[in-house]
């Protein structure tokens, strides 16, 4: 099942913003405030293929000076399955790094100079008291004897102190505006306005305001189109079923029309139209 327009709109900002060197550096500085000498040139984004997890993505991978591999995923619904996805992303990233270094030989006796991995989850949902750290061994397998572990730090607090807290504010404001105004231009414009007023992603939103709003509206329109299509197909299914029952004599045309809140004439016209479009 495809994610909702709400999730896709938030994912768009996450992926677009943090794939830009300036904001990726801000993300790294939020994760490592002690690292004062890292520049944009030290950070290299890595692509994470989605052959294994074939879904629209909201994850990010990058290396820092080739020594540190950082994998980050944002999610609005809480699930420990994020640990499985991070494990698959890590394996996929290692394969890509190894392929990029033709001189590396995994069959050689020498240890490969692999970057040290770090894993993060940016949680933007409503669940309270989420753990600060989740562990594959402890939380997923519930077995300390499992010879494999992956730990991820969970970040869920909104605030304007760094770009992660600002992104969480953006997602919360977005959800509030969609609940209040529905999938409308008003919701998109108010989300951007409120975030800028609160100092959340202000620089990014000012530079990409038109793009962000237009992408939201496009996704909203797609969502409504899918809903309308689904409702039409549902109604066509009901109409077809009742028409079949009238045809085989198990239901009168009057009762069939009544069940669909139609007059007999409307029912007959709808059945004829269904035959034409079938």
Image (cartoon, rainbow, N blue to C red):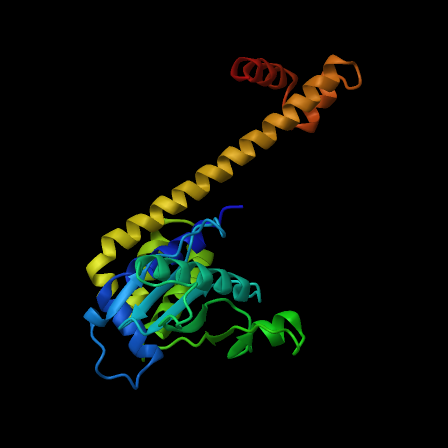
Which quarter of the picture shows residue 178?
bottom left
Residue drawn 40% across and 46% down?
220
The residue under the point 33% across, 66% down is 62
| Residue at x 59% of width, y 26% of height | 236
Of the pair 161 and 31, the residue shown nearer to us: 31
Left or right: where 253 falls relative to 81:
right
Quadrant for the C terminus in the image: top right
Residue 155 percent coordinates (x, y): 44, 75
Compared with 141, 272 (above or below) is above
Q: Picture quarter containing residue 10? A: bottom left
Picture layout, residue 80 above or below residue 155: above
Of residues 71 and 239, which is closer to you in this image?
71
Q: Residue furthest front?
A: 109
Residue 160 seen in render:
no
Image coords of residue 52 (percent x, y): 49, 51
Which residue sits furthest right? Answer: 250
Report whether residue 266 is seen.
yes
Nearer to the camera, 219 or 130: 130
Q: Is residue 194 left or right of residue 158?
A: left
Check the image and name the residue furthest to the bottom. Answer: 34
Count of picture labels: 0
Q: Residue at x 26, y 69 (%)?
A: 43
Q: Position of residue 272 (x, y in %)?
A: 58, 13
Q: Quadrant of residue 158?
A: bottom left
Q: Is residue 278 left or right of residue 209?
A: right
- Residue 171: x %, y % from top left: 40, 64
Up-down: is 216 above or below 144?
above
Relative height, residue 27 to residue 253 (above, below): below
């Amino acid at each position: 099942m495809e994610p909702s327009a709400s999730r896709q709109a938030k994912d768009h900002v996450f992926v677009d913003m943090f794939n830009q060197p300036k904001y990726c550096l801000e993300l790294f500085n939020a994760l490592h405030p002690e690292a004062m000498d890292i520049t944009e040139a030290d950070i290299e984004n890595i692509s994470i293929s989605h052959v294994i997890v074939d879904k629209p993505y909201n994850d990010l991978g990058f290396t820092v000076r080739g020594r540190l591999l950082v994998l980050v995923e944002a999610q609005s619904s809480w699930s420990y399955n994020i640990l499985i996805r991070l494990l698959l992303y890590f394996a996929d990233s290692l394969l890509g790094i190894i392929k990029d270094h033709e001189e590396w030989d995994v069959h050689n006796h020498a240890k490969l100079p692999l970057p040290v991995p770090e894993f993060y989850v940016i949680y933007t949902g409503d669940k309270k008291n989420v753990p600060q750290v989740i562990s594959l061994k402890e939380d997923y397998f519930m077995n300390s004897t499992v010879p494999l572990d992956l730990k991820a730090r969970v970040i869920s607090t909104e605030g304007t102190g760094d770009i992660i807290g600002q992104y969480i504010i953006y997602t919360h404001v977005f959800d509030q505006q969609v609940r209040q105004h529905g999938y409308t231009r008003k919701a998109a414009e108010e989300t951007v306005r409120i975030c800028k007023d609160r100092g959340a992603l202000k620089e990014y939103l000012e530079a990409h305001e038109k793009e962000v709003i237009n992408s939201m509206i496009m996704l909203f329109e797609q969502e409504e189109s899918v809903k309308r299509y689904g409702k039409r197909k549902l109604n066509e299914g009901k109409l077809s079923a009742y028409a079949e029952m009238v045809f085989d004599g198990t239901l009168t045309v009057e009762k069939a029309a009544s069940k669909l809140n139609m007059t007999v004439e409307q029912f007959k016209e709808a059945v004829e139209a269904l035959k034409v479009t079938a």
